[in-house]
Amino acid sequence: MKALVLVSCLVVCLAPQPLAAKQQIFVFHTDEFWLSLHHFLYVLGRAENKERDSSREAVVGAPSDEQRGLSRLNTSEREIWRKAVSAYASGVSKKDIVFDDPLPEITKALTRAGNIKSLSGTVDPTISSILESAAPIYRKGWWAQHNGANMKWQKTIQSLVDKHGTTVMAFITTTYKMQWPANGFDVHISAYSNWAGAYSTKGNLLVLSSLDPSTQGAYGFETIFHEGMHQWDEQIQDALIEQAKRIGKYFPRGLSHSMIFYTAGEAVRRVISDHVPYAEKFGVWQRGMESFKVALDKAWKPYLDGHGTRDEAFAAVITRTAIAPPKH
């Protein structure tokens, strides 16, 4: 009887066990027609307004892209398109697409709209009217090329996520002591996004440009983690502010963003040995962030290498960067 029990145990114990479900890291969306049209009109409107950010690399090519598409249109179609761009220039394009209401809600509604035929009841009637008037022209002049770029970008980045994503995610969540969402972050891919080529805004909304030269390959891979980390901004800033209060100083604006650049770049560098982190490659540190980089090298890098606790590292970074209260 004992032998029979032992054999039964061996059969059960040695039988293949079902694998645990793999953590979803990102869910990519490439076929969101209305979102792509919205962003294209947005950056063209900013170019028409001659906004300073319209010369940034992620969007500087949009007017030339527009001209190529216009060559496929007849006179009437060009006129309708120009009216749509001008309507955005005088309204939506005057706002910051990341921070200014109601743009985040409009963007989120358009991600839900996907590629439906009509926007009726989806977004503000003024916006839907502009988009619907421009939609047939956008389909004729640009959509095939833009959607092709979206799908190509997604294929490349998905391969990097499949290969390195679990390791990078583990490094980031362990470092920040934050939880990655169980269903992953939705990443909405659009030909254009904003001057930065990518953004994250309230409501777990991540948007990436498929045409921006600085979001290609390993830099797109780093950027999606970077934008996901922005969803923790409030919690991380609260923790840093608490450290600043303990020494009677103020939290410096831009510090938490610098930490994201540093951490995401270091996470990717550790799995792709020849990767130069985004902030170094594209001169981010030289845009008024040099002092943060020095502090992070001294106080944050040792923590990334396994020394001390997160809060000790936060305290050390704050000690080097916090702003003294004004003298009365």
Image (cartoon, rainbow, N blue to C red):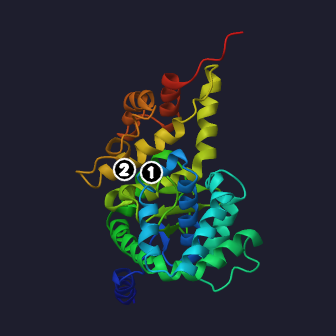
Task: Quarter of the image for the C terminus: give it.
Answer: top right
Residue 67 or 127: which is nearer the viewer? 67
160 vs 79, left or right, is left
Looking at the rendered structure, the kind of residue marked 2 is: Ala
Task: Quarter of the image for the N terminus: give it.
Answer: bottom left
Question: Which quadrant would residue 240 be assigned to in this image?
Answer: top right
The residue pinned by badge 2 equals 267
Is residue 232 at least partly visible in the picture?
yes
- Distance CA(mark 2)–CA(mark 1): 7 Å
At 54% across and 36% down in the image, what residue appears? Answer: 254
At 64% across and 19% down in the image, what residue appears? Answer: 248
> Which disc number belongs to residue 172?
1
At 47% across and 33% down in the image, what residue appears? Answer: 313
Is residue 124 at least partly visible in the picture?
no
Residue 162 or 21: which is nearer the viewer? 162
Residue 107 or 270: which is nearer the viewer? 107
Image coordinates for residue 263, horizontal then vertical, percent: 42, 45
